[in-house]
Image: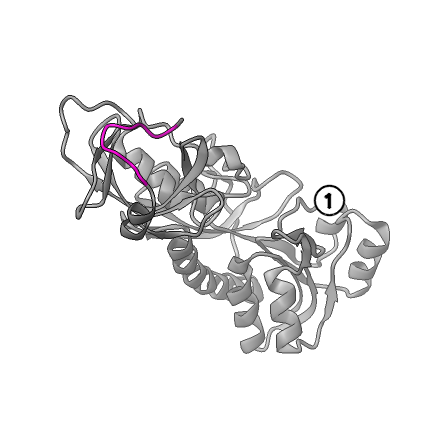
Amino acid sequence: MRIVFFGSGNFAVPILKFLLENNEDVVAVVTQADKRAGRGLCLKPTAIKEFTLKSSIPADLYQPSSIKDPDFIGRIKKLSPDIFIVVSYGDLIGKDLLDIPAVMPLNIHSSLLPKYRGAAPINWAIINGDKETGITIFKMNSALDKGDIILQKRCSIEHDLDVCGLEQKLSGISIQALEQALFKIKSGNFPLYPQKGPGCYAPRLKKEDGFINWNCSAQEIYNRIRGLRPWPSAYTYLDFKIFKILSAEIDESDYPGAVSSEVIRLGKSGLIVKCGQHALRLNKVQLEGGKAMGIGDFLRGHNIKSGCKLGA
């Protein structure tokens, strides 16, 4: 089958690599245009573009400024693809494109649809404290992540797993799922199942999503720290500066008399902050304008006293 691959993020790289290693006929790779990033606002290519150039893939690389560009759509149509495989592309693909492949446009989504439709399913699964997630492979239509399902695979979310760890775990599962889906499609036996239930959305992350409400439980804040690493990171304020909490662990002591956001203890045990329920022991932090560092190194360079409050 002639495949056009759409992908941009890191999650898509192992899947494209799998297709190439299995000698699938990838006739084109489509990724988003380079974007300015970092302090110098230099143009940065997508992970898929970097992989494609390093691997010398014998397929055309497309970076349309708009996925709706008629010239781009015409070029894809001339390739006469049988199937699209779309993974972490980062933009909604319209009907004009979806109607092109002879067999179907296929999407690999990192949640158990209809739960967590949208841009950040891995993050929101961790933030919400889910114990399970998975991969859904479905036939695309013009609605966002609402197509009929070919297959799903489930996986557990361990209590200490962060975004990078879960992304790596799901990437391996997605390759297994894609291998099964392609076998079904090639054999002509691929029943489709409509999504059941109302579902929910996993919207694109914003910087404000990282703000810590210390009235929440330690477990809820710990989940937010895991789910927002590496970006935008969970943060509070210390001396009116953004104070990122990069790593922490739950302290199940109640500390009667302490109030939410209060620094309870300093010293060998680290920096412990009271939450709405229980407390958090901070392990790695970053103050605005400074470097990320372990809490011991941070405390040696900053005068923080027990009883002070974070968030202001």
**Residue type at mark 1?**
Lys
- On the image, numbered disc 1 is attached to which residue? 95
Identified at 74% across, 51% down, the residue is 97
Query: Vertical placement of 260 versus 201: above or below?
Result: above
Residue 218: give x, y in percent of width and height. Answer: 26, 34
Residue 113: give x, y in percent of width and height. Answer: 47, 42
Q: Nearer the viewer, residue 210 or 238?
A: 238
Q: Which segment is the magenta one? A: 303-311
Asked whether 305 falls inside the magenta stretch, the response is yes
Q: Nearer the viewer, residue 264 or 166?
A: 264
Asked whether 131 falls inside the magenta stretch, the response is no
For mark 1, give the secondary structure.
Answer: helix
Residue 268: give x, y in percent of width and height. Answer: 17, 48
For the question of whether residue 22 can be seen, the reply is no
Image check: 108 left or right of 274?
A: right
For the question of whether residue 69 can be seen, the reply is yes
Quarter of the image with the N terminus is bottom right
Image check: 245 left or right of 35?
A: left
Residue 35: give x, y in percent of width and height. Answer: 68, 53
Chief SS of the magenta region: loop
Q: Nearer the viewer, residue 15 or 81?
A: 15
Image check: 81 left or right of 233?
A: right
Identified at 70% across, 77% down, the residue is 58
- Mark 1, Cα crowd under 10 Å, few <14 / some 14-19 / many 20+, is few
Q: Nearer the viewer, residue 73 or 259?
A: 259
